[in-house]
Image: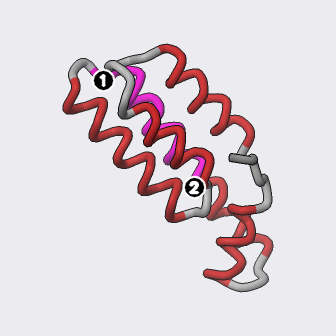
Amino acid sequence: MAYDPGAIDHALSAAVGDDPALIADLRAAFIESAQGVLSALELAGDDLAWRDGLLRLRGLAASFGAVRLAALALDAGEASVGDARALRLIRRNIERL
């Protein structure tokens, strides 16, 4: 799955029109939310917290057209709680947004 840095901006433009300031604000809010979910995943102490965080991240990513991030969250569901590789991949993807 290829990384498309313009997918989020395209999804936001389709939703709110051509308002660069609003798009920038929504993009920042999305990234902040994704970072918050990542922090919760890093602190997840059990399977329920891990799976709940991954579901929240998938939904958030899908809402903003971040297909790769949604796929990483889905893949992490097969990993054990706190899996370092899964967290690293998710963190890298969020940093690239």
Q: Does 78 sit above or below residue 1?
A: above
> Which label sits on residue 44?
1
Can residue 41 be found in the magenta stretch?
A: yes
Rendering coords of residue 83 (x, y %):
43, 17
Tell me the colour scheme of the image. Answer: secondary structure
**Residue at left offset 66%, top offset 63%:** 25
| Secondary element at tag 2 | helix
Q: Residues within 10 Å of mark 2 (few under 14, many from 20)?
A: few
Q: Is residue 66 left or right of residue 35?
A: right
Q: Residue at x 32, y 20 (%)?
A: 81
Q: Position of residue 5 (x, y in %)?
A: 78, 53
Please tell me which residue lies in front, 79 or 34.
79
Mark 1 / mark 2, whichever is N-terminal: 2
The amino acid marked with disc number 2 is Ala
Residue drawn at x 43%, y 42% is 74
**Which label lies toward us, 1 or 2?**
1
**Magenta range:** 29-44
As drawn, the residue found furthest toward the bottom would be 17
- Residue 69 sits above or below residue 5 on the image: above
Q: Residue 29: which disc? A: 2
Residue 93: name its quadrant: top right
Could you tell me which residue is drawn at 67 percent across and 81 percent down? 14
Tell me, for residue 26, which label it has, or none: none
In the displayed structure image, the side of residue 7 where residue 63 appears, left or right: left
Residue 81 lies left or right of residue 87; in this view the side is left
For residue 51, above or below residue 12: above
Q: Secondary structure at mark 1?
A: loop
